[in-house]
Image: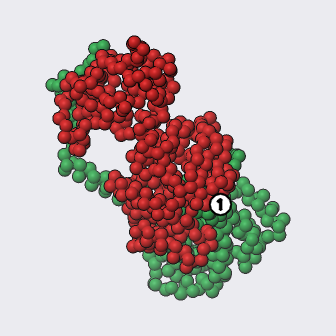
Chain colours: A green, B red
Amino acid sequence: MAVETIPASAPRAVPPTVSPERRRRRRRVRSFLNYVALTIAAVVVLTPIYVTIAFSLQTGPQALQFPGSMWPGELDLSVFRRVFEVSGIGRYLFNSALVAALITVGQVLTSITAAYVFAELEFKGRNLLFVAFLATLMVPAEVTIVANYDTIVSFGWLDSYQGLVVPFLATAFGTFLIRQAFMGIPRDLRDAAKLDGYGHMGFLWSVAVPLARPAIAALSVFSFLLAWNQYLWPLLITNDDDFRTVQIGLRTLASSNITEFNLVFAGTVVASIPIFVLLIVFQKQLVRGLTSGAVKG
Amino acid sequence: MAGVSFNGTSKHFDDVVALDQLDLEIPDGEFLVLVGPSGCGKSTALRIIAGLEEATEGTLHIGGVDVTDVEPQHRDLAMVFQSYALYPHKTVRQNIEFPLKSRKVPPADRRAEAETAATMLGLGELMDRRPGQLSGGQRQRVALARALVRRPEVFLMDEPLSNLDAKTRVQTRAELSELHATLGATFIYVTHDQVEAMTMGTRIAVLDQGRLQQVGAPDDVYDRPANLFVAGFIGSPPMNIVEAAVERIDGGIRLAIGTGAFDLPESWGAAVSATGIERVAIGIRPEHLRIGDGPIDGVVRTVESLGHERHIVCELAGTDHRPGDLVPGDLVIVRQSADDPAPRMGEAIHLGAEARHLHLFDPDSGERIDP
């Protein structure tokens, strides 16, 4: 059999070269374009926040002017006190905090236990059941809202905390997120825990949950955010001010204080503060939780 | 303390037979090494002892009690994993105390037990660190301390040294042997490294494709391998295996290898004649092959110097089974002292060995033929 050989003198393909100066320039241009894109994104995100704060610091007539000013008026923080006086926003904030906290605790607990079952226990039809569970993510909340409303009415839970909380105690997203975290735990750790004398519950609470902390923190923040920002469901099942949440309260504030627009903006600022604090405190966990398992590390 | 016995134990994963009818008695206090290549079933056997896998057939007894259906936590075993399996969120102290916590040992006693185990393994300074802050050797010792603190009947070890560097491995090997001598407990140790098997085990059990090939003291397995697989697996460099044609001459047996031939001693001849085979597999350890006067002709292909010794790879003349290949003939390795004169590459040589160092096998069944 003839063997083809490359003569030693054959010219070799030389890879194209780029001068270091040109490479540096390219890098600088790419970096500049990145900064431009990020600045535009930041402006888009921050403008509504700035406008809300600026308008809340204007007087009532100033806020109603057209075209209005984008600059805050005098630094008069009394508007924030007034918003508590003229509306029941204090009660609304309390209701939102309570409902969001209960929903968060509930979702975290049900997600942890369901995720453990889907990640660790072997039973017939497990994968099918998990797919069916995940499929509920595809169903928009509006589709089930009438059925949920009927159920809550039949339980007599209109105008009640349980009506606000119970329909949201389980989440397919949370189960999925934590199941992924549990599946990243090496099998040897489960085996070691078994030999160390721990059953499923022992392993779950002593090993799996501490190791899945970033995902659990991310889920907690998400659950709280979603629960805090709920609008349609609380509007539907509450008529009594004692059970209304802050988002409904803001709507009421807006419709009953049309001449004091700054008050509405001040209320919005007050309602946003807990969420901002939460995001700032848990920023790291949120990012780590959502990206955990994305890369091998 | 307790012995362990497999009684016709098998494990199937769907169509794959991981362990096939294993019968093995491990007496109380023994250091048994399960050795074999990847996928031979050694880790499956260990996991069956631990209760982490269920046997498909057969039974398992620990301390004379049938534990086939007993949960892992009730078997009174401790296991050291290849990955160490330390809980990364717990400190060294918490890792060591963890098995005692499940047994509801009071905190003060737990602490004392952990301190004792840690002192024994030289972990005193590291008790408040997390596994991520330890070296491989230190993690290994923490895993051992966690096993030790429970004072189990049986210690199981699944390739515990494979992630360590060469120097730490040698040191930890000695420490484990010492620990076994101190505790007197039953140690069952899985490895694919035959050096570990030879140096640590009271006995070694060689597995291949889920079947037990041979069990015995390391020297016995090395000196009298039961079949071709064991002969090729135990020993580094491995035993040279060469096929030879059996010629019956004047009532004796002559074996022809390539261009060379030699007569077998009478006792061997009778044994080979009794089998009626036409070809035989000859096994010779590299350290038993001599360059100089000998009936087998060969050519030196490579000379590898290891400093204290030399490995000389020779091609046997007249054994060109694969025409067209770079090296078409059978290769053998000769282990030579660094003090001996080194042959040149391409040099024609003669090879020989003493008859007492020969191992003969039936090439079809692979079984050993004894004189």
Query: Please, what secondary structure does the residue beneath circle 1 have?
Result: helix
Measured as percent of width and height from the top left, residue A210 is found at 55, 66
Image point 52% across, 37% down: which residue?
Answer: B213
- Residue B121 position, x and y percent, is 42, 67
What residue sits 64% from the left and 44% below the top?
Answer: B7
Q: Quadrant of the N terminus of chain B?
A: bottom right
Q: Can the viewer see residue A177?
A: no
Name the residue: 36% across, 40% down: B236
Where is the C terminus of chain B found, in terms of image quarters?
top left
Q: Chain of mark 1?
A: B
Q: Is residue A276 left or right of residue A122?
A: left
Identify the image quadrant of residue B293.
top left
Kind of residue at disc 1: His
Dividing the picture into quadrants, the one containing residue A13 is: top left
Where residue B164 appears, as percent x and y from the top left, is 38, 54
Residue A22, image x, y percentages: 21, 48
* Relative to A232, B131 lies left or right: left
